[in-house]
Image (cartoon, grey):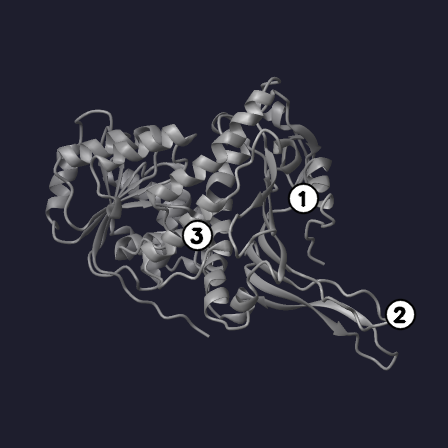
Amino acid sequence: MSSQIIPVAEFDLVVFGGTGDLAQRKIIPALYHRHRDGQVVGDSRIIAVSRRPLTPDEYLAKANEALEEFVPKEEREPEVVKAFIKRLSYVAVDVTDDAGWQELKAKLDTHSDRVRAFYLAVAPSLFGQICEYIGNTGLITEKTRVVIEKPIGKDLNSAKALNDSIGKVFREEQIFRIDHYLGKETVQNLMALRFANALFEPIWNAAHIDHVQITVAESIGVGSRGPYYDTSGAMRDMVQNHILQLLCLVAMEPPMSMAADAVRDEKLKVLRSLEPITAENNDKVTVRGQYTSGAGPEGAVPGYLDELEDEASKTATFVALKASVANWRWAGVPFYLRTGKRLPQRSSEIVIAFRPVPHSIFDTGAGGVAENRLVIRLQPDEGVKLWLMIKDPGPGGMRLRHVPLDMSFAEAFEVRSPDAYERLIMDVIRGNATLFMRRDEVEAAWEWVDPILSQWEDNGDSPKKYTAGTWGPAASVALIERDGRTWHEDD
C-alpha cells in the first residue's frame, strides 16, 4: 500500500539558527525528504539564517554534510541531492542588531506573494527580539507564518510573557507552536482509531476503561544538554508539553470536525478538567527520580550529577504522576504518566487498559483471564497492539492465552514512515494548525504543572535515586501498585 503525495504551494522558508543542531539534524533532512517525494515543488526556497559569516558555498557544504550524516545512504540519490541543494541559500543576520536584515528583506521581496514561513530554531530568549525585527523590517505578509519550538516558558508567567512578545507582531493564527510528538504517525492514528471506528468510541469511557498509562522513556542521559536540562528537568522538558498533549488526545471529546480550532477546543477542555495536585496529595501521586551510575546501551554510564559536575543539583530526570480528569467520561479513571532518562530502553507508548470481564465462566485449569489492552506504540517501532484472550490451540482442553493482534506500520504499509518534522513543516506551509498548540493550551498546561513544581521546591527533598538502566525509583512502582495495577511491559 502506498501513500498519496500532495504537493504544497511554492514557499519561502527562513530558518533562523540555520547552522544549529536542530536545523542540521532535523529540519534540513525533513525538507530533503519532502523534496525527494515531490511535495516541495517549483522554485520553493529554504533560506538559512545565522550570525556566522559563512560564504554561500560554505553553507551549502555544511548542509550537504547534514544530509550525509542524517539521511540514509540509500535515500540520497546524487541528482536529487543536487536539485535540493539548489533550493538552499544563506544570509548572515545578527538577530540582536540591524546587520543583515535588509539583505534578507531584498531576497524575500522577490517573491512577496507566496507563503512565507519563519522557523525560529533558536533559544526562546531570542523569540521576541527576532519577531520584533521581522515586523520592523517589513517582512510580514498575509501569507506569513512563524514557527516556534519548546520550551515555551519555564512557568506560567514566563510562558505568558513569551506569548505576549510574539503576539505583538503576529496574529494567533500565524503562530505555529511545534510539538514534534504530535507529528508522529501513531499519534495521529490515535485520532483515526477513536473517531473512524465504531468499535472503540462507545467503550472509550469510565464504564469500560480501568486506567490509562502513558510512558515516554529515553535510554540516553542528558549528555551535552546538561546545562539546559538542569534548569528544566523531566517535568518541564517532557510532561508539560509532550505527555499532556498525548493525554489530551486520549481523553478529549469527539470534535465537530478535524478543523484546527475544533480539535484544539476539545484538548483545552481536557487540560482545564485536570484535577489539581495539591500539597495534601502531592506525595501520594507524584514521584521524582534522578539517575545514578549504571548500565547504558553501550556499557557503564555515569550518574546525572557526574555528567553535570554539580553534586548539589535536585533536578529530576524521572517523573511519575497519577493524574485525574474530572468529567463524566473519565470520572474515577486514573492516568498514570511516567518519563525519564537512562531507562532500560527508548520507548514511547500509550496503554488503554480495559476493565476485566465481570465474571469468568472458565475453571481454574484454563488459566486466569487478563484484561484487554490497546497499546499504541509511538516509538521506536510505530504500531498498534490489541491484547485479547484466546484459546490456546490444541486438543488439551480449554487453556486461555493472552495474545496481541499486532500491526506494525513498517510491515503493514510499504512506505517509509516520515519523520514528524516532515509532516509538521508541510502543515505550516499549508496553514493547517491542527497539530500545533494554541496559546491557551500552553498556558492551561502550565496552570496545572506550576503548583506541582512549586510544591516540590517548597518540600526541599532531593529526587529519589535510581540506577541507570532501570525503570526509575521503586516509589514509581509503588505509585501504581498501591492501586492494584502494574506498569505495562510488552511480552
Task: Tell whether 90 sits left or right of 77.
Answer: left
Instruction: Give whichever of discs 2 and 1 has the lower sequence position.
Output: 1
Label 2 to label 1: alpha-carbon separation: 35 Å
Q: For marks 1 and 3, give the CA distance.
A: 24 Å
Residue 1 in sight from this viewpoint = yes
Rendered position, 172 above or below 391:
above
Residue 126, percent across and down? Answer: 30, 29
Labelled pair 2, 3 in contact (Cβ < 8 Å): no
**Viewer-proximal residue among 220 and 432:** 432
What amino acid is at disc 3? Leu
Alpha carbon distance from label 2 to label 3: 45 Å
| Residue 229 x/y as whole percent | 50, 30
Identify which residue, 8 or 208, lies in the foreground: 208
Label whose residue precedes the other's in the sequence (2 or 3)? 3
**What residue type is disc 2 on?**
Gly
Measuring from the top left, give residue 378's x and y in whole percent.
54, 55
Q: Residues within 10 Å of mark 2 (few under 14, many from 20)?
A: few
Q: Which mark is residue 306?
A: none
Q: Which residue is mark 1?
A: 344
Residue designated by label 2: 365
Number of the label disc, if any, that sits on residue 182: 3
Percent x, y for residue 445? Answer: 44, 40
